[in-house]
Amino acid sequence: MTGSLNSGGSDSGDVGDRRTVLAALTAIAESSQDGVVVFDRNTSVRYANAAARTILEFPAHENPSARDLVADTAASTLDLVLAELNATGAWTGRIAVGSPARPILVSAWVLGPTDGHEVVVATLVDGSERQEREEELVDALTAVRRRAREQRIIAGLNRAALTGSFDDLVATALQSIVDLVGATHAVVFRRRGADRLAVHAATFEPPDEETLPSGSSTLAGHALEREEVIVCADTRDETRFDVTLLEDHDLRSGIAAPVRGGDGTWGVLVVYRTEPHTPSADTLSFVVTVAAVLASAVRRSDLERELRYRSLHDPLTQLANRTLAYQRIDSALGVSREDGTLTAVILVDLHDFRTINDSFGHGAGDAVLTAVAPMLTRTVRPSDTVARFGGDEFLLVCPGLRSTFDAIGVAQGVLAMFRRPLTIGNRTTTVTACMGISVGYGEHTAAEMVRQADVAMGGAKKEGPGSYELYDKVQGGEALRRLTIASELRSAIENDDLDVAYQPVFDVRSGRMTGVEALARWTTSSLGVVGPDEFVPAAERAGLIGPLGSWVLRRACTEAARWQTGDPVELRVNVSPLQLRQRTFASSLADTLERTGLAPDLLGIEITETLWLEDTSAVKNNLDELHRMGIKILLDDFGVGHSSLDYLTRFPILDAIKIDRSFVADLPTEQSEAVIRAVVSVADAFGLDVVGEGVETTAQLDSLVRCGCGYAQGYLMARPLPPGDVTALVASGGRMNVDAGPAR
């Protein structure tokens, strides 16, 4: 029932019933945890339960006015409340009571007349207690959310520790710590030697090669030395370790937790702040847990590394085993295919090793093997691989060699090593060996290289202990001559003892000389005339193809530049695939043209179809660059490869093709003419010139003309000429004269 505080009225009904009801209401009010107050029209307290007296802080025997209970600052608020009650009969809000003032949550409403007057009933709740309870609830919820986030982070890190990259795990862990605990920086240090710590990862960019001293010079070092968690709440109060480094970086507090590996303390996790801070138990527990996760990842990584090492190394000598040896050969051959260097595989077989085992036992044999292994490792280059291939055999993988001589030098060094006596226990003994050598530029597989080395070693064994043999000598008996050629060729290049002859190329329609093909020629005092079919392969094997090719290009370009006095005469030079594997070939050729003064459009390089089998990035880049420079590219020996048409489609940088002399030699047969007509038709479709080479008879020349071939070269028109004769031919107009038949 609602009404005015100032209105009157009387209750009807039995007084006894009213007292019973009032007694029941009083009992309910006294048992309530909320305060209950009854005011009269003059704001005098007519009734207050125990909870209200506690909240309002007045004794049980007093019945003060409501105005006496509210704080001085709330007097005006009370007037507004009374006005609202007069107007609407109800009010809910906060009123400050007591001194100092405290907020009280009040709900008040007007009841009907009691003893002839209306009264106001109000319930009271201590606002400060409710706020504390709310804050406690918020804190509890925050703690639950933080704990749930910590658990999610730890679960994710544990999964990464089992399957992921260790460096990715560390980076994620450090960032998670900074985000969760509000730290400034987090760092993982790891041991570097006996007395230094290195930064493995950090949430900032550390200086290059940043290391810290271990021990009590730093927070991290102190934790590592003590092998326990160290908390520094404030560097200004710290006495356990030197805080200079922290102060130099404006850091005031930190936590350091050791990270334990499989064989002791691996490193330490450190969390830094720029302000003093005492971490909570939850924060400390989280940091320690993350350090434990990192430790488990370290142990997993160590175990994987150990298992990987065992799978690739011989348990007795700790050298690479057969599996790793094959991997190293494959890798070396891949590099050889890219850069044109030589790879050698050397098989080493200990002589009469069975006698050692039979005479002194297998323990003595094992001792010999373990003594030989480090000696071999010290003898070869750091980039070489020494492997135990099985039983008493070792395998050497030597990449990046310049020539076969380098491989022989390795073998000779190993034999010299074996001449030194070994001390095995109390005995001194001498071990001898035989070696087989296989060399290559990547044209064979690893298995084939090992097979060749094994065959060569069989030949070495026939010559007796302390011998080595090259595979090609065993197979063909030409290694000695090739080695002699290679040895003398090096001197010939350095001393300009080679010559270049030039075979003219004619336009068969006009009879005019349009170009010349440069052909290296060499005569030695010991071997006589050595043809290019011998010295070019020897140069490739000896790592001299680059110097030889550069010499020929330089000499030919210099002489060709002198001929350009009338109609242009193109120079064509054969280029080896090994030259085009060299990444600097195009730039070096550009320098040669600039120095000699020969225009790029007057130079053509002749390549064979075998080049496309290389199909490396270096080869492609060189050919593309030569094409951009305007240098012509001619495909030699066309028609004898496996996929000639495919090359024309895949490499649209060719300017001409040269029909292999084997087809020209069969002219003028109907079958050969059909083949040449087909070649000319294909060339026309691709916009290419066609050159027939090896022309020796007028019948062959006439047949080429009938088939539509535009250019020809051969003994019929001219043999390879010295530079002076080419000069004279150019001066005379360079006309083709075949009336007298081929010059002999």
Image (cartoon, rainbow, N blue to C red):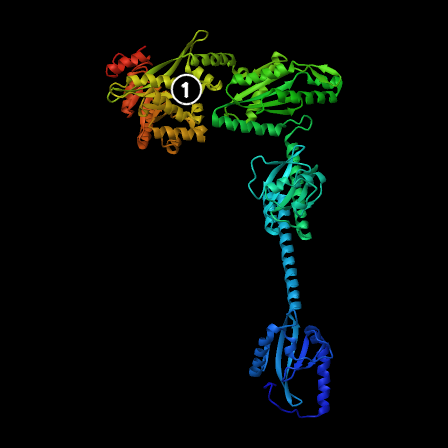
Asked if residue 94 can be seen in this view, the reply is no
Q: Residues within 10 Å of mark 1 (few under 14, many from 20)?
A: many
Asked if residue 157 can be seen in this view, the reply is yes
Quadrant location of the C terminus in the rendered image: top left
Q: Which of 423 and 698 is in front in this view?
A: 423
Residue bearing the label numbered 1: 549
Helix, strand or loop for disc 1: helix
Please determine whether, in this image, residue 290 is positioned above or below residue 670.
Answer: below
Q: Nearer the viewer, residue 425 or 105?
A: 105
Residue at the (73%, 90%) spot, across then down: 16
Q: Nearer the viewer, residue 659 or 573?
A: 573
Horizontal relation, residue 260 to residue 437: left or right: right
Q: Where is residue 637 in the image (x, y as percent from the top left)?
A: 38, 23
Horizontal relation, residue 115 to residue 635: left or right: right
Please determine whether, in this image, residue 38 is positioned above or below residue 368.
Answer: below
Residue at the (68%, 50%) spot, across then down: 285
Tell me where residue 427 sits by quadrant.
top right
Three-letter residue code for mark 1: Gly
In the picture as drawn, the residue positioned furthest to the front comes out as: 72
Q: Position of residue 423 (x, y in %)?
A: 71, 17
Please determine whether, in this image, residue 130 is positioned above or below residue 433.
Answer: below
Tell me where residue 34 sits by quadrant.
bottom right
Quadrant location of the N terminus in the rendered image: bottom right
Tell me where residue 464 sits by quadrant.
top right
Q: Where is residue 688 in the image (x, y as percent from the top left)?
A: 32, 29
Q: Where is residue 23 in the image (x, y as percent from the top left)?
A: 73, 84
Horizontal relation, residue 494 to residue 37: left or right: left
Please determine whether, in this image, residue 357 is positioned above or below residue 168.
Answer: above
Residue at the (70%, 42%) spot, across then down: 240
